[in-house]
Amino acid sequence: MFRIILLSFLLLVQTNLFSATFQEVEAKSRAVIDLFVSKQFTILESQIDPLYKSTYTAISLGRDWEELTGTYGQYVNAKPVNFEVNEYYQFIAYKMNFEYLPYIFNISFNAEGKIIYISFMPAHKMYVAPNYCDISKISERKINVVNGFYEMPGLLSRPNSDAKAPLVIILMEAGPTDKDGSYEENKPYKDLAWGLSTNGYAVFRYEKRANNYGIYMMKDKAAYETFTPREDLLLDLYKIIDTLKTLPDIDPSRIYILGHGQGGMLAPLVAKEREDVKGIVMMGANAKPTQIMMIEQYKYLTEVTPNKRDEYDEQTAKALVSLDKKLNPLTEHSKMPYNVQATYWIWLNNYKHLEITKKLKKPVLILHGDRDYQVNMSNLELWKKTLVKNKDVTIKNYPKLNHLFYSGEVKSTYSEYYMIGNIPDYVITDITNWLKEN
């Protein structure tokens, strides 16, 4: 069986280096693919760095290729889906299509242009950029934004252009959501970032403070310190806006917030409080109060996964307690949904996002998946009813999409989020067209 070597390439490339070297690295890697296809494995072996020649020999490379094509059919074509470069190596990955199934081909070169790494990986075992992402047109660089004690590591994706780019900042879902919105290999926020950057927009996605400072936040929680969506998301987002709009390659007059889930629900408040935000995109955002949405979600899940009824009943009971208009901010954490401080739920109880959105004088795009069980269709109908007279609001829904905006046919469940996929191209097109018009 051919080797499957799993490596993680985490170093990121600066814009000028990316655009200067992509064509060179792709040319070298395409030549390697041609050697595989033409079965010139001895020539291929001669391009291996001497340190790795015991790993990659003409015999082993030929055996791996023959087994791959023997199992999955003849080679058809290949498209770049990832690219990274630093002072130590140049890495490029391709989605390699065969007659029956695609595979991922990874290759790295050292500074002298010698091959130091080759592997083939099943496409369903790693993130693969969708076809609407053209990595030859974009770059990605690391930016860490500091807000007092907290540092938010982030990635800025942008088109390879000298012009100032409009900026989209992704405001993430509730819970321990990372910068990519990851569910194993599924990375919907990365789909959005690379898809929009391919179409001319800079996109920033980042790690929320809870992901890196959980132990400190647990200490605050134990001391019953106030914790609300402001401390969870908004204070850091505002610092990010202040930081990124000063960058020389960002157009500060065109800053948009793309919120998903709870991030979408909070986006209208951001638009209200920040004059420098030109418009907002709300994906899978609840119109109903958060706890009501949660209760409806638990009811749905009890029907499709009845073996977890006790767990859902417990969370439903806690959600009902958290809706009390006279809720004491010092209520024991164990009585609150997910053991999150009572101050969080008190803040949400007082947050009137429907009224705020209705009064906004900025463009709003609301997107919803009909198969979204977390934020069901009754939320979409409430958005439509509330905003029917608002000419600045555009609403679109997608019959086959779930809360992640991934496609499916049957009733959606949490386990579906781990079925490998990408956000469909038509969602990226709708967002891009709206951005161009606003």
Image (cartoon, rainbow, N blue to C red):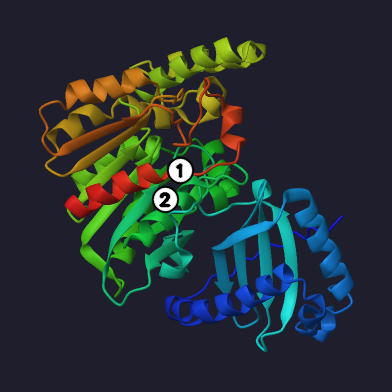
Residue 276 vs residue 40, the one in the foreground = 40
| Whole-number angstrom distance, CA of label 1 to CA of label 2 | 8 Å
Q: How many marks?
A: 2
Q: Callout 1: 10 Å neighbours few (<14), some, many (20+)?
A: many
* Three-letter code, disc 2: Leu
The picture quadrant where one finds residue 366 is top left
| Whether label 1 touches label 2, CB < 8 Å | yes
Is 11 rendered above or below residue 78? below
* Apparent side of residue 367 relative to residue 310 in the rendered image (left or right): left
For image coordinates 50% across by 31% down, the residue present is 340
Q: According to the image, label 2 marks what residue? A: 192
For image coordinates 61% across by 73% down, the residue present is 30
* Residue 358 percent coordinates (x, y): 16, 31
Identify the residue at the far bottom of this view.
Answer: 112
* Three-letter code, disc 1: Ile
Q: Callout 2: 10 Å neighbours few (<14), some, many (20+)?
A: many
Q: Is residue 270 visible?
A: no
Residue 179 vs residue 413, the one in the foreground = 413
Which structural element holds mark 1?
loop
* Residue 169 percent coordinates (x, y): 35, 54
Residue 402 vs residue 244, the one in the foreground = 402
Which structural element holds mark 2?
helix
The picture quadrant where one finds residue 60 is bottom right
Is 141 rendered above or below residue 305? below
Q: Is residue 162 visible?
A: yes
For residue 322, which numbered disc appears in the image? none
Q: According to the image, label 1 marks what residue? A: 423
* Apparent side of residue 51 relative to residue 152 in the rendered image (left or right): right
For image coordinates 46% across by 27% down, the residue present is 330
Q: In the rendered image, which quarter contains the N terminus?
A: bottom right
Is 25 rendered above or below residue 104? below
